[in-house]
Amino acid sequence: MSKIDHSLFSANEHALEHSMGDCPECGKPLHVKHSKSGPFVGCSGYPSCTFVKPLHDTQTTLLKTIDGTHCPECASALAIKKGRYGMFIGCTGFPDCHYIAPLKPQEETAVTCPKCQTGKLVSRTNKYGKQFFACDHYPHCRYVLNFPPVESPCPACGWSVLIKKKGALHCPQPECDYKQSE
């Protein structure tokens, strides 16, 4: 006698097959599909219907509601939330209101962006908590530095910014190997 109940494997359909609902574009059932980027929800009517959505729509989690604060756009309460790019302040009225603000204000340096010559370099933090410096005219200017900038021209190549790295000033240009101890 086998300890495995084989009747569990004889079902014609899986229990979770229809739990994704129906496609909003064509009405056919949605299924979990797999790609090299990972799982996603796709229409069973593919290739005639190309509807797809991420498997996890609720990637943002509400950590704490901030008492005494109000959204400037809809007057709902503000909350600290965690999303795919780290923590931020967002409106509790989402998805009707899309107001967000950084958890801490960006620190502007007095250094002019050497690439676009119009923006300033601001301190930002990536989703892992690492600090970097980027032009405040993003996405029009995508200049980024991983170390604190110093507005001083490089004597070797003339680039308008140097960076503080390991107790010395370096030129951020890859083709220039200028280094000056502080």
Image: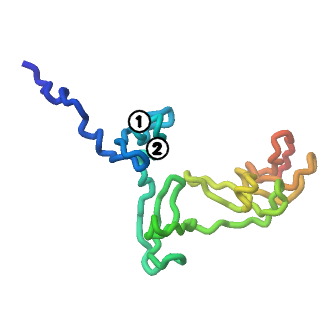
Which quadrant does the N terminus fall into? top left
Image coloring type: rainbow
Identify residue for label 2: 52
Q: Which mark is residue 159?
A: none
* Whether residue 172 is situated above or below residue 10 in the rendered picture: below
SS type, badge 2:
strand
Q: Is residue 151 left or right of residue 10?
A: right
* Whether residue 1 is situated above or below residue 74 in the rendered picture: above
Q: Is residue 158 left or right of residue 129?
A: right
Number of residues whose C-alpha sits closer than 10 Å to that of mark 2, classed few (under 14), some (14–19) or many (20 or more) = some
Residue under the image location 50 percent in, 67 percent down: 90
- The amino acid type of the residue labelled 2 equals Val
Residue under the image location 29 percent in, 42 percent down: 18
Q: Which mark is residue 33?
A: 1
Q: Where is residue 47? Give x, y as percent.
A: 47, 34
Quadrant of residue 30 within the rendered picture = top left
Query: Answer yes or no: do the residues labelled 1 and 2 have beta carbons within 8 Å?
Result: yes
Which quadrant does the C terminus fall into? bottom right
Number of residues whose C-alpha sits closer than 10 Å to that of mark 1, classed few (under 14), some (14–19) or many (20 or more) = some
| Extreme residue in the left direction | 1
Residue under the image location 79 percent in, 66 percent down: 110
- The amino acid type of the residue labelled 1 equals Lys
Foreground pick, 143 / 51: 51
Q: Where is residue 142? Give x, y as percent.
A: 73, 52
Disc on the earlier residue, 1 or 2:
1
Foreground pick, 29 / 112: 29
Q: Where is residue 44? Give x, y as percent.
A: 39, 37
* Whether residue 42 is situated above or below residue 123 in the rendered picture: above
Work out how far the residue at label 1 is from the one at label 2, CA to CA, in angstroms.
9 Å
